[in-house]
Every structure is written in structure tokens, then in C-alpha cells.
Image (cartoon, rainbow, N blue to C red):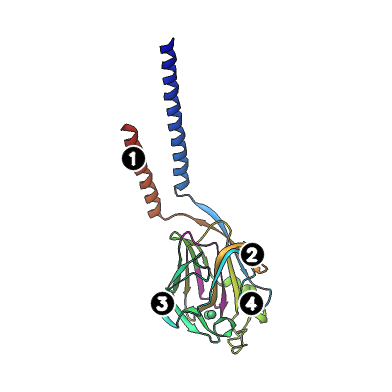
């Protein structure tokens, strides 16, 4: 009787171990499934500030936000520049191949200081540390049809924003045309000036590329980054559903990681 009891207790203990193992495997598989590459749809909403024509800052609100004004960057081209956007280190990024100019009729918030520009299709890029941010906004000055800005996450292109929609929206609104700032006020009257906001509503981005796909330049200032709470008072330019699919390289890496983890688990079980 006592022996039977002992046997039964041993069996119970064995069953409990098995269940624990099953549970652990279940958790592991769930974790692996979560890590495996999956297409993930998310929405970008793009707004331009309408509160006052000539607005050079955002009306959105944030849990964390910072602004790069380029005032501490010397003028010149081909620059690598790391900044925390004045966030005290909460958000940081490195600009590569950046050109910075003195304010002129094409750019420079408030008509003074420095601004960012590119004249090439290679352009310049901003690489964020960590998992990136879900908001980017900037004062887009002297907007032209060749201004392209592209958002990426983990090497995957999320959004290639062409200026056609924004140009169409401000077309005919004379308040947006020409430099709004003294001492260049009214100059370059054939091109609009507007503050543009990009809100990712379903995820983050960690790389932004500015490029000029033809003649002219892509001028901008007051690069604003952060984690948004409300989208402010701007008008919607477009709301675009994007699909992020991890790179094949990453998928292979995840797959390889799973195989390695499986063999390690098998070895541990066999030992
Ligand atoms: Ca500036
Ligand atoms: Ca331009």
C-alpha cells in the first residue's frame, strides 16, 4: 500500500514535470511565433499646419519631443552629426551626408540661422538609436515637386512621401507662397512654405532619408521628433496604409535563431 502510494506520488511528480515542460514549450513556441517575421499593416497620417500660414512649429502634443534647429551645426556639406534634439538623451539620431546652409530665401526658420538641405538624389539620412520614434515633423520651405522623404524601420521602407498631395492642397492658397520671414519675406513667391507632420499610428520608424529627385533643393528646418499623443490642428494631407515586411536577411536570422534554440533545448533535454 505504502509502495503503491510512493509509486503514485512519483508518477504525479513525473506528470507535473511533463506538464511544466509542455507549458514551457508552449510559451517558447508562442514567443517564437511572435518573433517570426509577419506582415504588419500600419497607418501613416500626414498633416500640414494651418493654424497660421507660415507656422514653423507643430501643433501636435507629445509624451516626449525634441527639435533640431541646426543652429549648432556649422555650415557646409557631407556632414555627419549626432544630436539628441534637446531631449536630454531620450531620443538620439545621427545625420549622415547632411548639408547645412545659412538662412536665405529658400530656408531657415524665422529668417535666421541655419537649415538642412540636399541637392542630390542620394540625399542625407537620419538614423535613430533604439527602436526609433513614431513622429517626425519639419518646416518644409521652398517646397517643390522633387522633394522626397522616405521612412524606414529595420531596413524596410515604410513610406515614400512625394510632395504632390501637399502641393495640390496648398495650390491657390497665396498665404503659403513665398518666404514668410523677414528679411526674405515674399521672396521665392512661386513655391509654398509649410510645416508638415508625419504620424505613424501603428508602429515606429528608425531611419529617414531626404532626397532631391531632380533640379532644385530640399530645404527644411526645425526637425521635430517624438512620441505623439494628439495630432494637433493641422489639415490631413493623406492617410496612407503601409505594410512593413522584415528583410529576408532578418527572416533568415530569426529562422536560424529558432533552429539554434531548438537544438540547444534538445541537447539540454537529452543530458
Ligand atoms: Ca534653424
Ligand atoms: Ca525646394
**Disc with the residue nearer the chain's start (2 vs 1):** 2
Residue pointed to by mark 2? 231
Whether residue 60 is in magenta: the answer is no
Q: CA distance from mark 3 to mark 2?
A: 32 Å
Tell me which corner region of the image, top left, top right, bottom left or bottom right, holds residue 94.
bottom left
Q: Name which residue lies at 56% across and 56% down.
A: 202
- How many C-alpha atoms fall within 10 Å of the one at disc 3: few (<14), some, or many (≥20)? some
On the picture, is 44 further left or further right than 120?
Answer: right
Q: CA distance from mark 2 to mark 1?
A: 48 Å
Q: CA distance from mark 3 to mark 4?
A: 28 Å
On the picture, is 258 further left or further right than 242?
Answer: left
**Disc with the residue nearer the chain's start (3 vs 2):** 3
Q: Position of residue 27 (x, y in %)?
A: 47, 39
Q: Name which residue lies at 62% across and 73% down.
A: 168
Residue pointed to by mark 4? 55
Q: For ligand 1, tell me if the residue under mark 4 lies within 8 Å.
A: no
Which residue is nearer to you in this view: 253 or 167?
253
- How many C-alpha atoms fall within 10 Å of the one at disc 2: few (<14), some, or many (≥20)? many
Residue 264: give its label.
Answer: 1
Q: Position of residue 143 (x, y in %)?
A: 56, 78
Judged from the image, the secondary structure of the residue bearing numbered disc 2 is: loop
Query: Which residues are drawn in magenta?
Result: 130-149
Amino acid at each position: 500500500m505504502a509502495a503503491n502510494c510512493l509509486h503514485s506520488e512519483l508518477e504525479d511528480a513525473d506528470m507535473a514535470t511533463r506538464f511544466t515542460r509542455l507549458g514551457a514549450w508552449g510559451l517558447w513556441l508562442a514567443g517564437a511565433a511572435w518573433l517570426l517575421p509577419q506582415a504588419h499593416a500600419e497607418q501613416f497620417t500626414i498633416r500640414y499646419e494651418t493654424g497660421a500660414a507660415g507656422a514653423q512649429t507643430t501643433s501636435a502634443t507629445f509624451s516626449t519631443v525634441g527639435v533640431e534647429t541646426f543652429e549648432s551645426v556649422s555650415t557646409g556639406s557631407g556632414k555627419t552629426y549626432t544630436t539628441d534634439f534637446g531631449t536630454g538623451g531620450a531620443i538620439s539620431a545621427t545625420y549622415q551626408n547632411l548639408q547645412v546652409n545659412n538662412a536665405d530665401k529658400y530656408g531657415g526658420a524665422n529668417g535666421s540661422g541655419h537649415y538642412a538641405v540636399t541637392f542630390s538624389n542620394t540625399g542625407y539620412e537620419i538614423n535613430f538609436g533604439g527602436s526609433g520614434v513614431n513622429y517626425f515633423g519639419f518646416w518644409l520651405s521652398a517646397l517643390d515637386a522633387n522633394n522626397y522623404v522616405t521612412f524606414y524601420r529595420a531596413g524596410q521602407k515604410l513610406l515614400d512621401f512625394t510632395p504632390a498631395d501637399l502641393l495640390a492642397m496648398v495650390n491657390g492658397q497665396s498665404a503659403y507662397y513665398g518666404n514668410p520671414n523677414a528679411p526674405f519675406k515674399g521672396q521665392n513667391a512661386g513655391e509654398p512654405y509649410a510645416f508638415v507632420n508625419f504620424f505613424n499610428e501603428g508602429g515606429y520608424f528608425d531611419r529617414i532619408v531626404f532626397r532631391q529627385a531632380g533640379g532644385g533643393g530640399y530645404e527644411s528646418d526645425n526637425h521635430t521628433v517624438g512620441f505623439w499623443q494628439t495630432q494637433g490642428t493641422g489639415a490631413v494631407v493623406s492617410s496612407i496604409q503601409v505594410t512593413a515586411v522584415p528583410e529576408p536577411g532578418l527572416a533568415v536570422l530569426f529562422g536560424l535563431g529558432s533552429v539554434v534554440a531548438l537544438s540547444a533545448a534538445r541537447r539540454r533535454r537529452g543530458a
